[in-house]
Image: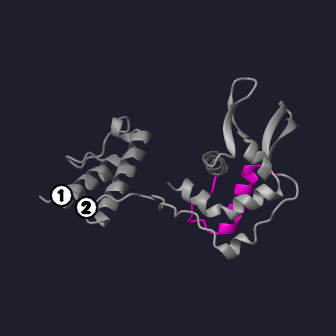
Amino acid sequence: MTELEKIERAKMYMDKLANGINPIDDTMAPDDDLINNVRLSRCFFFISDVLRQVIENGGTKTAVNKKPKKLPLEIPIEKRSQFVYSEVPIPASEIAKRINALADNDTMQKLTYSGILTWLTEIGMMECALTPDGKRTKRPTKIGEETGISVEERTSSNGPYQVVVYNNAAQHFIIDNLDAILTAENM
């Protein structure tokens, strides 16, 4: 008996079990028999369907609904000119959102604000710092501040907090160095 024939037989058994039939002697199982339990019956139908897919694939397993791996983000130079710069300083998350909107392609990875922060840290514009309550955070260095990165105090329903924001010049700096940021994030 070949592997495919064994799989076909297993599917036949699952079909019978799912329908409350004893696969050995083809008799109907009593209503109170364990194989008539609704959960088991659903499980048998599920297994039968998986086996059907394996049979249709010639006896091989394939990944079901596996999402294809996304391509690295690429923003052509001409698209970068469409970036909407803000005169009001904005956080890195908003910059990443606006860059991702330029990609216009769901098959590509998205740039994250942490990708921007990591690159800025690597080039010495951001550094790790401790907040007054002992948490680690990123803050601009002197060079970062000179480029247009600053910290703003804001208030939410949970109280005051600080956010790192990027003025127009800092936004230009990020867009001008987008290739380096994307290369660093894809490593």
Q: Which three-letter amino acid code belongs to the residue tagged 1?
A: Glu
Q: Which residue is mark 1?
A: 3
| x, y percent for residue 122 | 60, 47
Q: Is residue 116 left or right of residue 108?
A: right
Image quarter for residue 180? Answer: bottom right
Residue at the far left in the pictured view: 1
**Viewer-proximal residue, 48 or 130?**
130
Q: Residues within 10 Å of mark 2 (few under 14, many from 20)?
A: some
| x, y percent for residue 103 | 65, 67
Q: Which three-letter amino acid code belongs to the residue tagged 2?
A: Gly
Marks 2/1 in contact by CB < 8 Å: the verdict is yes
**Viewer-proximal residue, 74 or 27?**
74
Q: What span is in magenta?
A: 90-112
Question: Looking at the rendering, in which quadrant would you find the N terminus?
Answer: bottom left
Q: Which residue is mark 2?
A: 59
Q: In the displayed structure, would residue 143 be above or below residue 104? A: above
143 magenta-colored: no
Residue at the far bottom in the pictured view: 78
